[in-house]
Image (cartoon, rainbow, N blue to C red):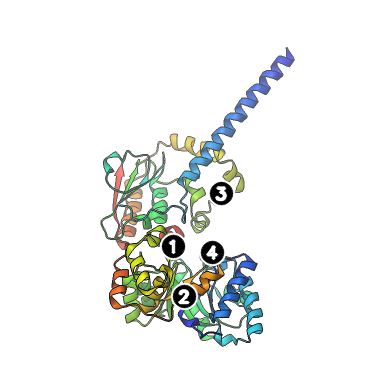
Amino acid sequence: MNVNHSSLIHIGTFQSANEPSLREVINASFEIGIYSFDTAPSYKTESILGQILAEKCAQYKIERSSLYISDKLDDIQMEESKGNIEPFVNIALQELRVDYIDTLFIHWPFEAYLFKSWEKLGELKNKNKIKEIGLCNVRVRHLKKIIKETGIKPDVIQIERHPLRTCDEELSYCRVNNISVQAYSPLCRMSHKITNNQILKRIACTYGKSIPQIILRWHLDTGVVPVFTTHKIERIKDNCDIFDFRLSDQDIKDINSLNENYKIFLESYCCPGF
Amino acid sequence: MDNMVVLLISIITLLLSLCIYISNFRLKRKIDAYKFHLLDDEVRNYDILVIGDEYNADKLDNKLVYRNCLRYRSLYSSFLILKERFSLLREDGKGIVYIPVKRKYLYGISPIDYINFHQITCKRLRCNPGRIRKRIPIISFVTWEIGQILTFRKPSQSEWDKLVDEMHLFCNERNININIIEL
């Protein structure tokens, strides 16, 4: 078994509701020592993930404390419960077959019921049902507002971040306030703007790595944990082969210069009134 | 003679059904044209968003323009769409949103709009379109258009100003330049 790099790289399960495919992905992750997984009710993968993880942990004799599971509270749950989200958290614990969730995020910062849901998450953290509480898809203005209104700081945020959207303001704020950052769509879904980019190609050539490996390393070297989703086993192995090198400061700067505030997951579309 | 009448009625019924079917089909395509496909529509950071009633945007050439204009669209409906689409606008404060509307259309939501709204928006407006409306939108669309044509009462100045102020506040908080154009 390889060294456990679980805390440095996470496997997402968005668009992964096909059980055989997800099973292969999780199997490959366990084989290379990645035990960190991300899900959400809207992904429809909570139950499958819980089942497969229970089997794999028994097979590989992995303790619960070595696993990292992050889940989310969706907008419809906050709306339907009017912020009293504990029943939905209990459902998530059942689906995932665990006693606690490592990180529970609010998926989108819908203003109605946001503060109430956030305060409830704080209470559940005190009850040890959740180790960390987090917010997804937030800007600095959301963070400032939620901390001001509730007095509860998030432990972690999860945002769309990649070379075309470097989120410098959010990273800077989180660094100062000791908030961890995770990045979803860390490779910008390998859009043509990424695959055809000359700077990324040059840097990849310099290190003898692929563009995805360079970008994932860039996330790590800038203090961000990437959360990537794939259905291909070979990509898990390739994307996790990034612990034998580090990018130079100049290379990091060059990648940062690609920022154009390009968002795949349009915030206002997913969260009207964002 | 009776047979002729039956035949005539059958032909008229058939033609009418065909007209309704074709109109419904075209309307569904129109509804789809207003839909935003998150992972397929790749353009972002528009210079200008035009959201509202039908508007001639020819003077906005040489800029990257997103148009979402629909005949008889109300100010309120435009605001709801703005809330769902404003992230398409460039973030450096140089983008602008134009909201062209006719003053007499303050509230009211076209079936084309509410079929495409976010589920939470629909839930709060209690306008969740049923399956029949989604499959046969022509019924609700014709009713709505007739209603808009027959609208004669203009809203009061205070009603209008209240919504306009709300829109300006929303945009200021998000560093969006907005220009409401009365047609």
Instruction: Give the residue at mark 2.
Output: A118
Q: Position of residue A212 (x, y in %)?
A: 43, 69
Label 4 amino acid? Answer: Ile
Instruction: Name the residue that disc number 4 marks.
Output: A76
In the picture, the quarter occupied by the N terminus of chain A is bottom right
In this rendering, do the residues under marks 2 and 4 share a single chain? yes
Q: Which residue is mark 1?
A: A190
Labels 1, 3: front one: 1
Mark drawn on residue A128: none
Q: Chain of mark 2?
A: A
Badge number at residue B129: 3
Query: Disc 3 on helix, strand or loop?
Result: loop
Q: Position of residue A120 (x, y in %)?
A: 50, 77
Separation (CA) of disc 2 from disc 4: 15 Å
Amino acid type of disc 2? Trp
Labels 1 and 4 touching (C-beta < 8 A)? no
Query: Distance between the Cα atoms at labels 1 and 4?
Result: 30 Å
Nearest to the observer: residue A239 or residue A270: A239
Disc with the residue nearer the chain's start (1 vs 4) = 4
Residue A209 in the image: above or below residue B25: below
Q: Marks 1 and 2, how far apart in space?
A: 33 Å
Query: In terms of secondary structure, where does tag 1 sit?
Result: helix
| Residue type beneath disc 1 | Met
State the residue in front, A213 or B125.
A213
Q: Are marks 3 and 2 in contact (CB under 8 Å)?
A: no
| Label 4 neighbour load within 10 Å: few <14, some 14-19, many 20+ | some
Label 1 Cα neighbours within 10 Å, binned few <14 / some 14-19 / many ≥20? some
